[in-house]
Amino acid sequence: MTHEQLQSFRARLADTGIGSSDFDLNPDTVLPEGRKLRPAGVLAPIVMRDGRLELLLTKRSSALKHHPGQIAFPGGKQDEGDADVIAAALREADEEIGLPRGSVEVLGTLPMHETVTGFNVTPVIGFVRDDFVIKPEPGEVEEVFAVPLDHVLNPENYLIQSRRWRGTRRHYFVVPYGPYYIWGATARMLRAWADRMTF
């Protein structure tokens, strides 16, 4: 990534903005007052491959209790030993895909995203400076794959779809890529990122 690209990412991520949520496309949703959200961090790792920028994503294990088989960022809830949500995202990326924390240059964060499962997730954008061997954590990650960054940062590639969930019809963003169906919270956070970037 060139110095100019790095500066552009940093500048756009420094802009303040309103947070997003799993409920953005469902304005009739009534959220309980006083709900307690747990802090979490996810990492959006940008890599340079064959002269183009790509984003690494994971496909969650089909054996997991929550969100089996879904496309996700590496990341998870903030533990007591984590200094902040950025540290949580870097730790989880190390554990889930074998990405050394020291290889990631953090470029910034997006506003928090509230999930239907009760987390306040901070997406952390990072550039992977060094090559590394991807090592998926077998219990959590079925596959690690890359998508062109300009694909997910182009708002025109997003669709809105819906399905019935807990007795009501729920709408959500999708940004398909090849065989990968990227939807839900991951797609919503990517769309928030796309909305503040221009290519």
Image (spheres, rainbow, N blue to C red):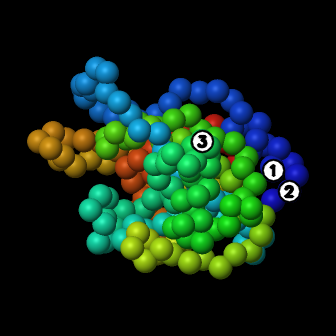
Determine which residue is flagged by label 3.
84
Q: CA distance from mark 2 to mark 3?
A: 28 Å
Left-right relation of 70 to 84: left
Percent of width and height locating residue 199: 71, 48
> Could you say whether the residue bearing mark 3 is in a helix, strand or loop?
loop
Q: Is residue 136 above or below residue 177?
A: below
Q: Quadrant of residue 26?
A: top left
Which residue carries the number 1 mark? 5
**135 up-or-down from 187: above or below:** below
Given residues 156 and 83, the one toward you in this image is 83
Amino acid bearing label 2: Thr
Residue found 59% across the figure and 58% down from its top:
91
Residue 87 % position (x, y): 62, 49
Q: Is residue 105 left or right of residue 91?
A: right
> What's under tag 1, amino acid-wise?
Gln
Instruction: Residue at 56%, 34% (x, y): give it.
Output: 111
Q: Residue at x 51, y 45 (%)?
A: 80
Read off the residue under disc 2.
2
Q: Residues within 10 Å of mark 2 (few under 14, many from 20)?
A: few
Few, some or many residues within 10 Å of mark 1 (<14, 14–19, 20+)? few
Work out whether residue 54 or residue 110 is closer to the camera in this orientation and state it: 110
> Taking 163 as reference, is 116 left or right?
right
Q: Is residue 132 visible?
A: yes
Q: Earlier in the sequence, mark 1 or mark 3?
A: 1
- Amino acid of disc 3: Asp
Q: Residue furthest left?
A: 167
For the residues marked 1 and 3, what is the alpha-carbon distance in whole angstroms?
Answer: 26 Å
Q: Position of residue 36 (x, y in %)?
A: 35, 30
| Whether label 2 touches label 1, CB < 8 Å | yes
Residue 53 makes an appearance in the image: no
